[in-house]
Amino acid sequence: MIKTRNRRWARVLGATGAAGALLVATAAAADASWFSAYVGASGVNVRDCYHPSVHLPPSTSCTYQTNLGSGTPVHIVCQRSGQNISGDPVWDYITYSGGEGFAADYYINTGYASWIPGIDICT
């Protein structure tokens, strides 16, 4: 009886440990790509390039969602090449209080000229 109980606990702990490790690994992977930044002095238009059913390269032709004012904090989730804006072809997929979408990297203060090291490429 004791050996059976110990084996059961070993299975439960093993399964719990594996699930916990997966959760930690998943959370770490998701957090690794986020980068805090803020909108530059002129504000930025946020665009939806994923709907209705195609993934368009980010551009000013994508559906307008909103304008974020100067200083608005954002999280950059991933980056993708798109329409060149003033010499910068990078677009940031951002989340902000109230939504998410693509914004031209040119208008986002990241501390980098364009591509941010360690940030995922949007697919």
Image (cartoon, rainbow, N blue to C red):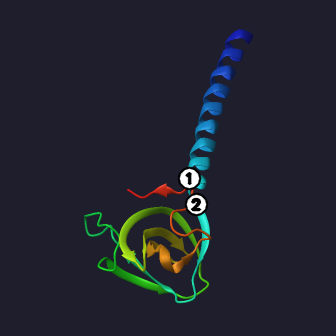
Picture quadrant where residue 80 is located: bottom left
Residue drawn 70% across the image and 16% down it: 5
- Element under disc 2: loop
Question: Which of the two residues, 56 or 110, is positioned nearer the viewer here?
Answer: 110
Q: Check disc 1 and give the amino acid type.
A: Ala
Q: Which residue is mark 1?
A: 30
Question: Which of the two residues, 110 or 51, is positioned nearer the viewer here?
Answer: 110
Decide if residue 2 is on the left or right side of residue 58.
Answer: right
Picture quadrant where residue 6 is located: top right
- Where is 64 relative to 19, above or below? below
Q: Which residue is mark 2?
A: 34
Residue 81 x/y as whole percent: 39, 64
- Where is 1 relative to 113, above or below? above
Question: Which of the two residues, 117 or 63, is positioned nearer the viewer here?
Answer: 117
Count of residue discs: 2
Can you say which quadrant of the picture contains the N terminus? top right
Q: Nearer the viewer, mark 1 or mark 2?
A: 2
- Categorize mark 2 by other alpha carbons within 10 Å: few (<14), some (14-19), many (20+): some
